[in-house]
Each structure stands twice: as C-alpha cells, then as structure tokens.
Image (spheres, helix red, strand yellow):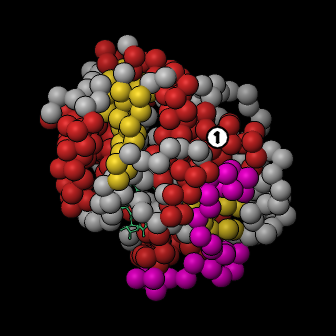
C-alpha cells in the first residue's frame, strides 16, 4: 500500500510525525508532499528535523497568498503529484488551505481521500478553517475522527458510514516528545518555572482586526505575571501594519519555538493564552490551564473538564489567565497516544 500525505502548515508537520513513524513500522510506503504554505525555517524545517520526519518527496513551494489564490495555486501541482505518485490513498490533515486544495484535487481524479482530524466543528462560518474542514469531510472517502464528539458531528451530517474513531495523533507526538524532553536541560524561557504564561495569537479573526488585536494585546500587557508571546509571522506582519507593539507591561514577545522547546515551555508555565486549536489541547494534556481568546472551541472536552476557558473581552482574558489551577482529572478524551497505528490499520481496510 502506498499512502501520500499532503502537508503545508506548522500543525500538520506535528501530525505527520507519528503517521510517518507508524507507516515505517508497518512497512507501508509513504510519500510526503509539502505544499510550501509555511516556508520560514522556524515554521517548517525545524519540525522535520526535530520530529525525525523524512524530508518531503515533493515540495511545491507555493508560499503565501489570499485564500483563493493560495488554495488555487496548490491544486494543479497537487493533481500532477497524485498522477505521478499513484497513491492508494491521499491523506490530508486538519483544516488548512493545503487540506482543502489536496482534497479537491484528489477526489476529482478519483484518488481515494482520507481526512485525519475529521469531524471537528466550531460552527463559526467566519473561520476559513471551518469551511476547509467541512468541505474536506464531505469530499473524503474515509473520515478519521479524533474524539467521540467528532464522530457525533460526522454522524449528524450523514457521514457515519465512512467514519472511524482513531483517537488524536497530536496526543501521540506530544507524549513522545514530553517523555523524551523530561530530562532536557535549561528551559527555553528565561523565567522561573510556574511564573509565566505562554501566549500565541495567529488566527485571522484575532490578527486581522486592529481593534480586536489591540484588545488582546492590552489584556496580555496588564496581567499580574510575565507573558511570553511566541509571535507567528502573520501576527508580526499585522501588528507592524497596525502600528501595535508586541511588548510592554507584562508582555514580551519572541520568535516561535521548535516543537520540543514549546512542549518544555508550556509544561513549565503557569498557563497558556491562545487562539490556536492544537495548543489548547496540548495545554490540557500537559495539565496546564488554558485561556482561549475565541468565541468557541472545537476541543469542547477541554472546557467541559475545566481546563480551558473561553475569553473575549480584556476583562475576561485577565480573569481567566489569572485564575487558579482547576481540579485534577484523569479523563483522556483524546485517546491513549497510539492513534497513528489505528490510522494505518484503517487505511489498510
Ligand atoms: C494557517 C492555517 C491555520 C493554522 C495555521 C498554523 C489556513 C487558512 N490557515 O494559518 O488553520 O492554524 O496555519 O500556523 O490554512 N507567513 C510567513 N512565513 C511562513 C508562513 C506564513 O511569513 O512560513 C506569513 C505570510 O505573510 C502569510 C501569513 O503569515 O500571509 C499567513 O500565513 P497563511 O499560511 O495564510 O495562514 P496562517 O495564518 O499561518
């Protein structure tokens, strides 16, 4: 069997790592196509290096662009890659423009399509990611769901017959990296363990509206403890455009971290403040309280279990980010850390 994975953006490289490892262990042929959506070394190459992912077999070098231009530019070269590589399955990950481009390119030429992290919903139609994931689920021949909740969304959209619960592959990689990092040396963050929060802000809904971005940055500045903002290129670009500073008060910013350093930095933090999807779940798995600066979350289990709070206004962000640690839980809604093996089994049929 020959699987062709399409990736392009940072969270997809993280999800690719356990899949590449499981495919190699199962003796399955695995071709990696990188669209080039993320191209800065700190957003791309370091993930391949640190997580031991084989270099991409094909790199399309598409780069940045508006949604239509970026997605459209990927489709032709992806079709060519599928025709040349002749995979039994195209495997797409998550909810980015690279996911949707590959999904459309594959199904139009009748290459079986599997969607990893299927069934997540925010029900927010202003989010580009929501359209990417809904359209990809409905195009896919196989929906690989991370949670029971995702399975129930797929069932309510009539997709139960093609859906399989595999668990969450980000849990696989997080546990592996956490355990390997346990005896790593100094912290990547120059503050005492337990004294600082880690923040990330990159979603269009937060970064692309000046007032919204200013509200979030002001709230971070006013916290009663240091906040280290790992500044995504989109955030840096928008802040410069709007004339907004990324430091001042309690706020300091620095370049994004490589994945193992991110895990260490979060594990030693007192809290996470983010609009990222994956980081909310990583905080929960590391049992660090999370404040999510969005109106909703796809990872509802983190909220239900008390480890994640949605906060929109400056006041809400301050209150949530300064709250005490919630009650301990041994619930494991994201699986056991062995999802990637189940993905390969499901693809084998
Ligand atoms: C994309 C995904 C989002 C995912 C995120 C992870 C879509 C619609 N969004 O958002 O779901 O959570 O990746 O990071 O696919 N840029 C650089 N260097 C890079 C990459 C981007 O400078 O290596 C800058 C460019 O100016 C670009 C902007 O960041 O215009 C945004 O990049 P883009 O790929 O459009 O989306 P992300 O915001 O990263």
Question: What percent of the width, then of the height, locates residue 338?
Answer: 60, 25
Which residues make up the magenta segment? 240-265
Q: In this rendering, does residue 37 appear at all? A: yes
Decide which of 45, 333 is in the foreground and name it.
45
Where on the picture, by quarter, is residue 321? bottom right
Question: What percent of the width, then of the height, locates residue 29?
Answer: 41, 28
Question: Helix, strand, or loop for circle 1?
Answer: helix
Residue drawn 42% across the image and 82% down it: 242
Check the image and name the residue furthest to the left. 108
Residue drawn 75% across the image and 65% down it: 189
Kindly identify which residue carries mark 1: 174
Task: Estimate how packed mark 1 is, as few (under 14), some (14 to 19) or many (20 or more) residues with alpha carbons within 10 Å.
Answer: many
Residue 253 on the magenta span: yes
> Would you say 244 lies left or right of 93 here?
right
Residue drawn 68% across the image and 27% down it: 331
Decide which of 110, 231 is in the foreground and name it.
110
């Amino acid at each position: 069997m020959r699987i062709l994975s399409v990736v392009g953006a940072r969270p997809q490289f993280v999800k690719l790592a356990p899949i590449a490892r499981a495919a190699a262990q199962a003796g399955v042929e695995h071709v990696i196509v990188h669209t080039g959506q993320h191209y800065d070394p700190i957003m791309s190459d370091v993930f391949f290096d640190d997580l031991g992912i084989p270099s991409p077999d094909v790199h399309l070098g598409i780069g940045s662009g508006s949604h239509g231009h970026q997605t459209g530019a990927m489709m032709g070269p992806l079709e060519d890659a599928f025709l040349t590589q002749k995979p039994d399955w195209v495997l797409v990950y998550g909810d980015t423009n690279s996911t949707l481009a590959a999904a459309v390119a594959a199904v139009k030429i009748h290459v079986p399509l599997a969607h990893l992290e299927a069934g997540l919903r925010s029900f927010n139609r202003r989010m580009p990611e929501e359209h990417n994931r809904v359209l990809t689920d409905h195009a896919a021949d196989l929906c690989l769901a991370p949670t029971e909740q995702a399975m129930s969304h797929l069932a309510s959209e009539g997709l139960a017959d093609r859906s399989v619960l595999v668990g969450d592959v980000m849990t696989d990689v997080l546990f592996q990296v956490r355990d390997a990092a346990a005896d790593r040396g100094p912290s990547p963050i120059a503050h005492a363990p337990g004294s600082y929060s880690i923040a990330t802000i990159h979603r269009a809904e937060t970064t692309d509206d000046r007032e919204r971005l200013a509200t979030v940055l002001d709230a971070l500045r006013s916290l009663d403890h240091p906040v280290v903002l790992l500044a995504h290129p989109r955030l840096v670009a928008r802040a410069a455009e709007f004339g907004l500073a990324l430091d001042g008060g309690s706020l300091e910013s620095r370049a994004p971290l490589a994945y193992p350093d991110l895990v260490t930095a979060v594990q030693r933090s007192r809290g996470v403040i983010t609009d990222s999807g994956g980081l909310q779940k990583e905080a929960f798995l590391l049992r660090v309280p999370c404040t999510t600066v969005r109106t909703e979350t796809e990872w509802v289990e983190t909220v239900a279990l008390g480890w994640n709070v949605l906060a929109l206004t400056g006041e809400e962000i301050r209150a949530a980010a300064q709250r005490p640690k919630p009650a301990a839980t041994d619930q494991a809604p994201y699986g056991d850390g062995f999802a990637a093996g189940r993905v390969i089994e499901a693809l084998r049929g």
